[in-house]
Image (cartoon, rainbow, N blue to C red):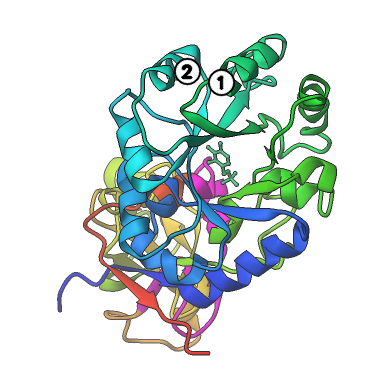
């Protein structure tokens, strides 16, 4: 057999999550964020599930080329704007809307030759202190942009640093509102966390919601609430197989560094998945994993191409042959049981964002079509 690891993208789950996002912000338009190659899923693979979005948020011009190539003619927003003046030509050519977060970008625009004026999202720094103009500066930059012939329309945006904390978006929202109250233009404030923790709060969600994580089925506030609590479905599943077994005696150890020691005789399985596939090495013994759809745990250190699982619970039930058994690292087993990616991420002291984005190139993908 070829190396059995494979990732799956569930089109139906994407559609369901998109409608869940819509329910939380019924009056807003949805920009589906597909930066980082759609959070590791592949823009071409998620497009079918997300093509009902009102627009897409991206980071790199190449991502817009893919979306236009797939036939999407609606709004596409470069969330960090252009990285150099030449990219303004790509914006003109591909009809991209783009963020303007610094004075250099304004200068580049003022020198840009274009037949068609651009729509920009002027970004305010309301406390994240990464990108954006300070609130006190905002109006004067708006006026300068508004006077440029290269600009057709100015929308207003900010990004929350603490949207995943209860009430975390609200102080930033009030700064934004205070310093934009007499400016015209559509507004975009909320990411997934702001959306889910403040459902149907139109004053917060405004015209354009920028949803990423929730579309892919990640919870915005695990472990307080899981994706299932939010009625979100897993989009990405990572599956492999058991390629060998070992029968341990009491005192035997497992893997590099011998970090796991068997207390009694036990059966373990070796799985074709390691950190070179994007499975986190920081996941210690005891991270949940499914074998034949049944929950068990990892043992010892994750190595580059393999990890070990405890087969004792299945063995005790009378399973004998394990080589070839399906292993679900996260997502949905072929038999329907699920393992929440947030739970695996939590064991690895990271977030589902990082696991999704970190899947390695060597893992082949299969798209599960929606046959409805
Ligand atoms: C990535 C990103 C988002 C999406 O955030 P999620 O937490 O994944 O919903 C929204 N806005 C901006 C500016 C981003 O960079």
Q: Say which label, 2 or 1, has the lower sequence index.
A: 2
The residue where tag 1 is placed is: 145
Instruction: Give the numbered dot on residue 106.
Output: 2
Stretch in magenta? 326-353
Quadrant in which the N terminus appears: bottom left
Q: Residue at x 49, y 70 (%)?
A: 49
Q: From the viewer's side, name the closer residue of 106 and 116.
A: 116
Q: Residue at x 39, y 18 (%)?
A: 108
Q: From the viewer's side, name the closer residue of 143 and 263.
A: 143
Q: Does the magenta stretch include residue 215?
A: no
Tell us which disc is closer to us: 2 or 1: 1
User: Can you say whether 165 is above or below 36 in the image?
Assistant: above
**Element carrying mark 1:** helix
Q: Residue at x 46, y 35 (%)?
A: 117
Please provide percent x and percent y for residue 186. 69, 40
Please provide percent x and percent y for residue 158. 65, 30
From the viewer's perspective, is 275 left or right of 15? left
Q: Distance between the residues labelled 2 and 1?
A: 7 Å
Classed neighbour count for the residue bearing mark 2: other residues with Cα under 10 Å, few (<14), some (14–19), many (≥20): some
Mark 2 and mark 1 residues within 8 Å of each other at the beta carbon: yes
Q: Is residue 341 magenta?
A: yes
């Amino acid at each position: 057999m070829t190396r059995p690891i494979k990732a799956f993208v569930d089109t139906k789950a994407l559609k369901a999550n998109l409608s869940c996002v819509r329910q939380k912000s019924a009056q807003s338009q949805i920009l589906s964020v597909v930066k980082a190659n759609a959070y590791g899923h592949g823009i071409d693979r998620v497009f079918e599930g997300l093509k009902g979005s009102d627009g897409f948020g991206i980071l790199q011009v190449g991502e817009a080329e893919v979306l236009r190539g797939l036939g999407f003619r609606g709004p596409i927003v470069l969330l960090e704007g252009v990285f150099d003046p030449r990219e303004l030509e790509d914006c003109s050519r591909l009809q991209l809307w783009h963020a303007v977060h610094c004075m250099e970008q304004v200068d580049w625009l003022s020198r840009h030759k274009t037949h068609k004026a651009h729509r920009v999202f002027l970004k305010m720094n309301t406390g994240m202190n990464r990108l954006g103009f300070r609130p006190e500066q905002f109006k004067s930059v708006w006026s300068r942009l508004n006077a440029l012939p290269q600009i057709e329309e100015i929308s207003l945006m900010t990004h929350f640093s603490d949207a995943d904390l209860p009430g975390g978006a609200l102080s930033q929202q009030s700064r934004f509102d205070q310093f934009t109250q007499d400016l015209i233009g559509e507004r975009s404030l909320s990411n997934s966390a702001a959306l889910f923790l403040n459902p149907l709060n139109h004053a917060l969600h405004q015209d354009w919601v920028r949803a990423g994580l929730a579309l892919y089925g990640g919870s915005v506030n695990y472990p307080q609430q899981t994706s299932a609590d939010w009625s979100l479905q897993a989009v990405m599943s990572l599956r492999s197989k058991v390629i060998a077994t070992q029968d341990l005696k009491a005192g035997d150890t497992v893997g590099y560094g011998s970090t796991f020691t068997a207390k009694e005789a036990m059966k373990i399985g070796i799985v074709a998945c390691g950190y070179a596939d994007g499975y986190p090495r920081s996941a210690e013994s005891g991270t949940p994993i499914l074998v034949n759809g049944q929950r068990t745990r990892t043992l010892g250190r994750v190595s580059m191409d393999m990890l070990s699982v405890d087969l004792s619970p299945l063995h005790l039930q009378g399973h004998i042959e394990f080589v070839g058994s399906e292993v679900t690292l996260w997502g949905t087993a072929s038999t329907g049981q699920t393992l929440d990616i947030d739970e695996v991420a939590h064991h690895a002291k990271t977030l589902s964002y990082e696991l999704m984005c970190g899947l390695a190139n060597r893992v082949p993908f299969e798209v599960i079509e929606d046959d409805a």
